C-alpha cells in the first residue's frame, strides 16, 4: 500500500513539471477573496472538460492539444512560475526572466498535456471543499482510471485577474509547487547562483519532451 501511494505521488509530481513539478504568490497579479462555491464549480467544470478531452475518440496528439488548451485557461501559469523561481527571480536579468517564463509554460503544458493526453477511461468526482485562506480555497477530487486504484488530488484555487485559477496541486499531502521550488533552487545553487544553469536544463527538458511527442 505504501509503495502504491509513493508511486502515485511520483507520477503526479512528474506530471506537473517532470523531472524538475505544480504551485503564497506574492508576485502574481492582483488576487481577491476566493469564494469556496465558485472554486468548487470551477474545478468541477475544468475536470469535466479534461475528462471529455481524455475520453474522446480523437488521436492522442489531438487529445494532448485539447488538454493543453484547457490547462492554459485553468492554471495561473505566470503566478506559479514566479513563485517556483522564488528569490532567484530578483537575481535574474529581464532577458532571463522572459526566457524562464516562456520555458516554464512550455515545460508545464507539454508535460501535463502529454501525460494526461495518453489516458483513457478517466472518471472524475468532486470531494470536500474548504476555505484555505481569504485568498484561496482547496477543492478535493478523486480520479479513477481503468485498472488503477483511485487517487485523491487537492486543487488550490485562487482568484487571479478576476477569474478562478489553479495555483497549486496537493498530492498525498505534498504541495507540488513547493517541491518544484526546492528542485529549481537546488539546480541554481549547485551552479553558483546562475539562473542561466536552470534555463539550460529547461531547454534540454523541452527538447526531450518534443522528441517524445514526435519520435
Image (cartoon, grey):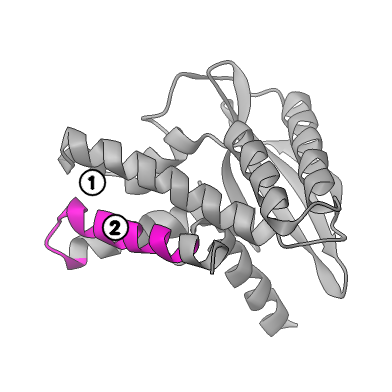
Which part of the image, by quadrant, shows the N terminus? bottom right
Determine the secondary structure under disc 2. Answer: helix
Q: Quadrant of the C terminus?
A: bottom right
Does residue 104 show up?
yes
Depth check: 20 or 34 in front?
A: 20
Left or right, 103 with respect to 211, comes to left
**Label 1 SS:** helix
The number of numbered discs placed on residues in the rendered structure image is: 2
Question: Who is closer to the viewer here, 138 or 91?
Answer: 91
Name the residue rendered at 82%, 48% in the picture. Answer: 51
For marks 2 and 1, the one nearer the N-term is 1
Instruction: Indicate whether residue 122 is drawn in magenta.
Output: no
Where is residue 83? Give x, y as percent.
Answer: 39, 41
| Whole-percent x, y for residue 10 in the image | 58, 71
Mark carried by residue 88: 1
Labels 2 & 1 near each other (Cβ < 8 A): yes
Q: Position of residue 54 (x, y in %)?
A: 79, 52
From the image, tell me which residue sits under label 2.
185
**Does 125 sit left or right of 92 as displayed?**
right
Left of 18 or right of it: where is 7? right
Identify the image quadrant of residue 111: bottom right
Q: Please provide percent x and percent y for residue 177.
A: 48, 51
- State whether residue 24 appears in this view: no
Tell me the residue at 54%/63% (across/down): 214
Within 10 Å of disc 2 (Cα), the crowding (few <14, some 14-19, many 20+) is some
Q: Nearer the viewer, residue 68 or 6?
A: 68
Amino acid at each position: 500500500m505504501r509503495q502504491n501511494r509513493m508511486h502515485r505521488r511520483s507520477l503526479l509530481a512528474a506530471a506537473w513539471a517532470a523531472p524538475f513539478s505544480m504551485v503564497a504568490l506574492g508576485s502574481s497579479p492582483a488576487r481577491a477573496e476566493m469564494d469556496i462555491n465558485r472554486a468548487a464549480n470551477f474545478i468541477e467544470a475544468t475536470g469535466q472538460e479534461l475528462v471529455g478531452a481524455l475520453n474522446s475518440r480523437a488521436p492522442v496528439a489531438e487529445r494532448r492539444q485539447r488538454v493543453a488548451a484547457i490547462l492554459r485557461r485553468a492554471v495561473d501559469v505566470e503566478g506559479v512560475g514566479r513563485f517556483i523561481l522564488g528569490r532567484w527571480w530578483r537575481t535574474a536579468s529581464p532577458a532571463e526572466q522572459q526566457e524562464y517564463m516562456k520555458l516554464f509554460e512550455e515545460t508545464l503544458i507539454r508535460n501535463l498535456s502529454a501525460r494526461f493526453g495518453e489516458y483513457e477511461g478517466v472518471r472524475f468526482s468532486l470531494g470536500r471543499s474548504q476555505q484555505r485562506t481569504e485568498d484561496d480555497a482547496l477543492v478535493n477530487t478523486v480520479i479513477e482510471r481503468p485498472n488503477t486504484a483511485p487517487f485523491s488530488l487537492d486543487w488550490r484555487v485562487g482568484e487571479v485577474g478576476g477569474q478562478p485559477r489553479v495555483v497549486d496541486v496537493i498530492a498525498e499531502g505534498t504541495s507540488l509547487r513547493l517541491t518544484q521550488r526546492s528542485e529549481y533552487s537546488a539546480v541554481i545553487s549547485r551552479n553558483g547562483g546562475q539562473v542561466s544553469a536552470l534555463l539550460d536544463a529547461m531547454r534540454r527538458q523541452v527538447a526531450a519532451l518534443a522528441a517524445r511527442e514526435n519520435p
